[in-house]
Structure formats: structure tokens, C-alpha cells
Image (cartoon, grey):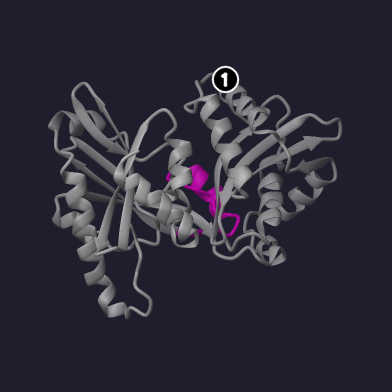
Amino acid sequence: MTGNKEKYKSFCEQRQSDVPLFQQYWWMEAVCKGKQWDVALAYDGQQLLGAMPYLYGRKLGITYLLQPQLTPFSGPFYCYPDGMPPAKKLEFEKTVAKSLIAQIESLKPAFVLQRFSPAVTNWLPFYWAGYQQTTRYTYRIADIRDPQLVFDGFIADKRQQKIRRCQQTTRVGFDMAPADFAAFHNEYWNSRGEKDALDISLITDVCRTAIDRGNGVIASLHDAEGHLLSARFAVYDDRCAYSLMSAQNKSLHRTGHTETLIWELIKYLSDKTVSYDFEGSMDEGIEYFYRSFGGEQTPFFQVVKYRNRLCEWLLKGRL
């Protein structure tokens, strides 16, 4: 373990509530299992001002820093001093970001990609350092603490009726084993004639780690005979829940299964967190589906830098 990782582990354990979920030490350990990750840290004396964890690797002589799998948001986060006025925050962010960027640049990576949390609205220090930015969108229900208000806010035609009908012939569970979910996820992609982009062991380990910590849940929907129809994995902290993985039984899939499971998951999470993030998507058809639950369009920054022109040519249009 590097010195920075040891310090970061200690900070996350002491001030867990201050660290965003996807930048937690335990999360990086889970999603980067079998790979390498590290963290840039900015200090003022002994006081941590900000951090930026990252996955890194080397292939064909090229060093790269990437977003870990199953991690929608990473990038920097800032530990603002208590009582800091808004007018001073931009200067604080500039100072901290410059320190983090300098540490990243010292690795001389050929390629860097980070997707910032929607909470990070200032990417200017990265622009000044030669990075490029693309605005992407996720969809969030800002407050799920009153499930009835959420239900009433669905805008898709007759969605409430479809869910009520589906509930009459299905049952929901929240105790699916991580290994069973991973196998179901793999079978779903195979049924589509595609290879699952996620390794079964990675899915199992990440689900188990989050659930054991009280930061994850697998929701499953079954028909009257007990057949598994649909399943969905979400992680959450006290601020927001994120829907990360889902799968359906294509041979038994019917209209309303996906909507019903999402609704049941939102109800389950309503006393555990504040917001619900659908985690994407930029796809036009999926965009409307998520928005139709009352999800608000929420922008975030994808920031990249190519030091190697071959990397730029190979990766353009694939990000």
C-alpha cells in the first residue's frame, strides 16, 4: 500500500460522512480488485484539503488513469473549511485542484479520464492544465423520502396503473444472494447474444461488500410461481442511492416488470437516503424512460486529457 493510500484509508475511516460514496476507500478497494489504484492528496500542513482517487495501469508501454468499473462518478472532492463563504470557494478549489493535478501529471499518463460528481461544478483548473470537457447527464429524483409524492410524479402515460396491475401478480424481495445476482446478470447478457462486460467475481464481490456495509441492496421481482423476473442492484449512502446494475429474464419479461421493480426499490430506499440516481443514460430511448419517473436532468463533467496522439485517435468517439 502506498503512503497516500494509508493516509486516505485513515481519513475515510475517521470522516466517512465527508467522503462521497464512490470515492470511499472501501469502494475503490472493491471495484479495483486485481488492479491498481492510488489517490492524489492535497494538504495544508496536516489538514487534508481534497483528494482524487484513480485507477491506473500500463499497457503497451502507455500509462493511463481511468474511471473504475461500476463507478459513475470520481474526480476530485474538496474538504471545505467550516464556515467558508461562497466567495472564497473558487479560490480554494483552484488551489486544491492545482495540487491534485500536479500529482497526476507527475505520473506522465498518456491518457486520463475522470467523470466528476455532479456536486463538482468547477472544472476550470483542469481546463487551464490542458484537459478537455464534455457535459454528460444523469437523471435524479431529488427527494424520495415521501414515496407517495414520487409515485404521483411519474409522468409516463398510465405508469401507475401498470405498476398496480403488476404488483397483483408479482412479489418483491430484498435478500437475493450476490452470487445469484451475478449469475443472473451474466445470463441476461448471454440471452442478448452479448458478453457481460462485468466479470462475475467482480459483481459478486462489489455487491457483497456494499451489502455487508449497509450501503447496498439487491431488489428482485418474482412471479406467482417464484420465477425470477427482474433484479436490480443499488448502492447508497445517507445522501443518494445509485442504480448500478440490472437484469431481466427475457423469456418471462412482461410490460411493467422493470417499472415495478424500480418503484419497489425506491420505496425500500425512501427511509435510508434522500435522492435516487438512475445513473445515466445518454441514450435517447433510455433517457426518456428515466425522466418519465420524474427524474431531473442532472449535468456532470467528463474530463479527459490525451498526452499521446495515438491514444486520442483510438479512443475518440468511444467515451
> Does residue 43 appear to the left or right of 217 in the view shown?
left
Tell me the quadrant of the picture where the N terminus can be found: top left
Q: Can I make out residue 281 in this image?
A: no
Q: Which residues are magenta?
A: 276-297
The quarter of the picture where residue 226 lies is top right
> Does residue 211 appear to the left or right of 80 in the view shown?
right
Q: Residue at x 25, y 69 (%)?
A: 92
- Place of residue 216 in the rendered image (x, y in percent of width and height, measured from the top left): 61, 46
Residue 132 is inside the magenta segment: no
Q: Nearer the viewer, residue 205 or 249?
A: 205
Say what amino acid the circle numbered 1 marks: Asn
- Where does label 1 land, which residue? 190
Q: Is 60 above or below relative to 42?
A: above
User: How many marks are shown on the rendered structure?
Assistant: 1
- Place of residue 207 in the rendered image (x, y in percent of width and height, measured from the top left): 59, 38
- Place of residue 7 in the rendered image (x, y in percent of width and height, measured from the top left): 35, 51
